[in-house]
Amino acid sequence: METFNFICTPEITFGEGSLGSLGEKIKNLKGTRVFISMDKALSDIKSQVKKLLDKEKLSYVIYDEILSEPTTDMGNYAGRLAKEEKCDIVCGIGGGSSLDIAKAVSVLITNDGRIEDYQGLGKVPNPGVPKIMVPTTAGTGSEVTFTAVFIRSKEKTKGGINSVYLYPQCAILDPDLTVSLPQGPTAFTGMDAFCHAIESYISKNSNFLTEAVSEKAMELLWENLPVVYNNPKSIKARGNMLYASFLAGLGLVNAGVTAVHSLSYPLGGLFGIGHGVGNALLLPYVLEAEIPEIDVKISRLSKKLLNKKSDTLSFIHELKNLEKGLKIPEKLSELNIPEDVIEQIAEGAMKIAVPLANNPKTLTKQDIIKIYNKAY
Ligand SMILES: [Fe+2]
């Protein structure tokens, strides 16, 4: 019989207007002074949050300088600020970057090191302060994961803090907050969620529970991503996307992502390519490189998503069509990446070892170079 372990954020509140419960959640977790990290672009949500916290007479510090994927410098600055301000709870509101900063700040408050000291697996010595996650994209799934990813400012490489002390205590999933997300980020973050779902689905570490949540996530994403892309105000579809990205996050945290994330990381670190863009672009090429290893599962998945029996190659063809409809770039050459760096980025990908170890097929450096060349 299959045995498994499954981890999930202890409290999830889902629904339109659920942001209204933020004050209550902070009080339940015994927070007295909240450090809030949020995206710069979210001024409307910022006013809502201030009103909510003022009403509850909660004190807070807002760090809202987050524009792009966070660097270690940004995270360390936020950590120092939260410590100086004596915050005892953190809240991340926004895309994965704001959530990751909040998770890192939580442990920087209670530990003396810097982010660089904790990048890797299990390197954080002490638990952090409580964390509440409010995603406004669907999404990175950061509201359920034990990872916070930062670009090392000096080396221009990406690395995650992976620690059980980064698990959030509470996630508020309010579809209203995702409605104003522009078309591009809606597509890229939605495809990142799809990558979490499909990669965890085919991961060597998947089990029947993770497969069930990953499959449900893909069904919802496949159906709703084109809807929210073309009709951003559809609250029902936005809700389905947010729920799906949460489920995909559960797949990710319990079964792990695979080679797509390993191959995408160096593109972010070296060339600033957005996480979702890199993943979405590479996904079909990685799947094409491992058809025999994924055929059984993808054929099963095809039946669910396409309502017909189809082989893996046909599924990849449909996936490419979906991405075309979302205006995802199809080739690395479209992203101004020089062709002569492929060997270097392949070396970078080999260093992102954990997702590669989860991959259904063992990929050598030569295999990875082949995938990049095909994607170029
Ligand atoms: Fe991701």
Image (tube, grey):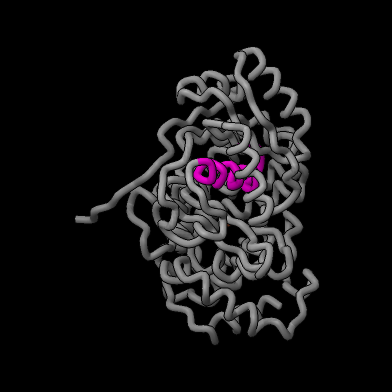
- Quadrant where the C terminus lies? bottom right
Q: Residue at x 58, y 55 (%)?
A: 149
Q: Nearer the viewer, residue 374 or 41?
A: 41
Q: Residue at x 56, y 62 (%)?
A: 159
Quarter assignment of residue 295: bottom left
Q: Nearer the viewer, residue 213 or 315?
A: 213
> Is residue 277 located in the magenta-colored stretch of the structure?
no
Left or right of residue 175, residue 356 in this image: left
Q: Main secondary structure of the magenta part?
A: helix
Left or right of residue 126, residue 153 in this image: right
Number of dots carrying numbers? 0
Q: Residue at x 39, y 51 (%)?
A: 210
- Quadrant where the N terminus lies? bottom left
Residue 167: percent from left, percent from top: 45, 43
Quarter assignment of residue 82: top right
Picture layout, residue 337 above or below residue 84: below
Picture layout, residue 37 above or below residue 279: above
Residue 77: percent from left, percent from top: 67, 47
Residue 122: percent from left, percent from top: 41, 57
Q: Which residues are magenta?
A: 92-109
Quarter assignment of residue 328: bottom right
Picture layout, residue 98 above or below residue 284: above
Q: Residue at x 77, y 28 (%)?
A: 44
**Residue 350 in sight:** yes
Residue 58: percent from left, percent from top: 60, 19
**Residue 320 in sight:** no
